[in-house]
Image (spheres, rainbow, N blue to C red):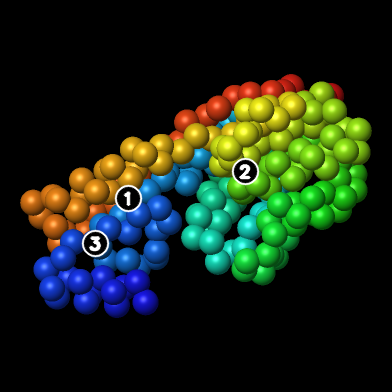
Amino acid sequence: GCVSLFQAFKKKGYTTVNYGSYIPGYPGKFVGLDQREGVRLGLELLKKHGHHRIVFLINEPREIGVVGPRLEAFLKLRKEFGLKEATVHDCNLPNWEDSYAASIKAMPKIMAAKPAPPAIFGVSGIGACGALKWLLQNNIAVPEQGAVFGYDDVPGSELMHPALTSLSHPAGELASHAIETLWETDPLTPTFEVRPPTLLERESVGPAKV
């Protein structure tokens, strides 16, 4: 679909930009977020605080373009970081279902592991919010007894108690650059450009409980 649309616009001499989520095999220009760097920042922070039992919570449908690259990065980086106890919990959420509710529903099974994983890495900010809510409702103190990290900085994350540690995405910068790319002098040459997210270290991640 997207490739066919690219070819149709190319024949008419138009420049197009794949913005946001990379489409594998897309032959044109791409401007988006460095998904691997975001996962690296999250794992690096958790490891720095002594967390090795980490669960990567996939509470979003696999159809969402960013989920695959984030999962791929997690699987590769946990090996590089020597995080042998880091695991993945996939909610297998159908498209258009409630990803917030999915994360809350997943928590009892995740926390039933022995020993319970002290760190939850949400593939989305919504997933991290759901995990944090469940922990607090079940009297599990954060960050004293567990840690929660969300890939996306959803609105209000800084107002939660504890404030959610997450990543800030340069959405305005990315959008501006995508528009600038449309006016380049060589509009048909494929390019691949990514920008790194920024770590927002707040209160939901702290030293691992020994």
In the rendered image, which residue does mark 2 sit on?
125
The three-letter code of the residue at mark 2 reads Gly
> Up-down: is 176 above or below 41?
below
Q: Nearer the viewer, residue 62 or 173?
A: 173
> Up-down: is 181 above or below 12?
above
In the rendered image, which residue does mark 1 sit on?
31
Separation of marks 2 and 3 at Cα, in angstroms: 29 Å
> Which of labels 1 and 3 is toward the front?
3
In the rendered image, which residue does mark 3 sit on?
16
Residue 179, image x, y percentages: 24, 48
Left or right of 63 on screen, residue 16: left
Q: Nearer the viewer, residue 129 or 74?
A: 129
Callout 3 environment at 10 Å: few (<14), some (14 to 19), or many (20+)?
A: many
Left or right of 132 on screen, residue 30: left
Callout 1 environment at 10 Å: few (<14), some (14 to 19), or many (20+)?
A: many
Residue 58, image x, y percentages: 66, 54
Which is nearer the N-term, disc 2 or disc 3? 3
Left or right of 33 on screen, residue 56: right
Which residue is at a point 76% across and 55% down the rendered structure image? 101
Which is nearer the N-term, disc 1 or disc 3? 3
State the SS at label 3. Answer: loop
